[in-house]
Image (spheres, grey):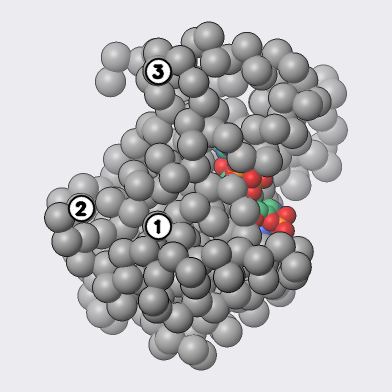
Amino acid sequence: MDLGLKNKVAFVAASSDGLGKSVAIELAREGAIVIICGRDKEKLEHAKQEVQKAGSGKVLALAGDLSNQEDVANLIDTSLKEFQAIDILITNTGGPPTGKFEELDEHAWDAAYQQLLVSTTRLIRGFLPGMKTRPWGRIISITSQAVKQPVNNLILSNSVRASVVGLMKTLASELGEYNITVNNVMPGFTNTSRLKNLIANNPSFSSAVKEIPLGRFGEPNEFAAAVTFLASERASYITGVSLAVDGGWIKNII
Ligand SMILES: NC(=O)c1ccc[n+]([C@@H]2O[C@H](COP(=O)([O-])OP(=O)(O)OC[C@H]3O[C@@H](n4cnc5c(N)ncnc54)[C@H](OP(=O)(O)O)[C@@H]3O)[C@@H](O)[C@H]2O)c1
């Protein structure tokens, strides 16, 4: 199947490692021009080389903290100076701290809100005008299986990510007339540094594998394949969905 991604411009947030990097690699492999970002410049440079190797298109690597308003504005300005508009926006960021309600103070809630919801709205606000002029666009948010079934000891993720899904579903209605689709992809337990850290801090996370029908944690490239399809021309009639890539972990019927 030709995904129709050749020369599309994609901004993949938080993509110097993990799920974001895997998505950037897969999009590059399909011929897209990719902008990646992350805070650590050395890690970002390594990722740039990996993404470049996967495809033949240009790769732009921009350092910045997605929780910082000025940094996000710079990421958007630099991308638009280089490409005028982008076609595909993948919103993503690092995961919030673990913990139960009484272990987390007001500051932790505010930081999670900035990290997960506000960074998403800033990226969309910055890139939307360009998509509307095309008019064509794909906005995909990387959230978590936690938005359908809360994960123990992750109250910040379980709570704040639900607001991101509300945002995405509403935008799917608002932006359909511009030929912009808006979807949400929910990773399950996937082998990245984030999962390794969760298990190191709380070994009970490793037993989650027993609750996964496919009997194993996912691999980042399995997640990236689903995101890449939704970002493609072939997914032109899919909008407003939340797609789980979780090996069957979520127990809802639909
Ligand atoms: N892996 C899983 O099992 C799983 C399951 C459900 C949900 N998720 C969620 O999916 C998202 C991605 O997870 P992952 O497993 O890919 O995490 P990861 O392996 O820790 O990678 C996170 C990436 O985001 C970048 N990043 C983190 N904070 C950032 C910030 N403030 N500004 C810019 N870049 C930032 C990191 O680079 P720098 O640190 O250099 O900035 C790195 O490139 C997270 O929100 C995570 O909670 C993951």
Which label was assigned to residue 26?
Answer: 1
On whether ligand 1 comes within 8 Å of the CB at mark 3, the answer is no
Local SS, label 3: loop
Q: Label 3 vs label 1: CA separation?
A: 23 Å
Q: Earlier in the sequence, mark 2 or mark 1?
A: 1
Residue 170 in view of the camera: no
Which residue has dot 3 on it?
214
Image coords of residue 17 (percent x, y): 62, 54
Query: What residue sits 23% from the left and 75% below the top?
Result: 135
On whether ligand 1 comes within 8 Å of the CB at mark 1, the answer is no
Classify mark 1: residues with Cα within 10 Å, few (<14), some (14-19) or many (20+). Answer: many
Residue 210 in view of the camera: yes
Contact between marks 2 and 1 (CB within 8 A): the answer is no
Q: Tell me the amino acid under the disc marked 1.
A: Glu
On whether ligand 1 comes within 8 Å of the CB at mark 2, the answer is no
Image coords of residue 172 (percent x, y): 30, 52
Q: Label 3 vs label 2: CA separation?
A: 26 Å
Is residue 107 toward the left or the right of residue 209 in the image?
Answer: right
Query: With respect to residue 127, does 237 lie above or below?
Result: above
Contact between marks 3 and 1 (CB within 8 A): the answer is no
Q: Earlier in the sequence, mark 3 or mark 1?
A: 1
Query: With respect to residue 210, does 232 lie above or below?
Result: below
Classify mark 3: residues with Cα within 10 Å, few (<14), some (14-19) or many (20+). Answer: few
Contact between marks 3 and 2 (CB within 8 A): the answer is no
Local SS, label 2: helix
Query: What residue sits 54% from the left and 78% below the top?
Result: 60
Q: Earlier in the sequence, mark 3 or mark 2?
A: 3
User: In this view, which residue lies farthest toward the front?
Assistant: 53
Q: Nearer the viewer, residue 237 or 168?
A: 237
Q: Tell me the amino acid under the disc marked 3.
A: Leu
Query: What residue sits 74% from the left and 34% below the top?
Result: 197
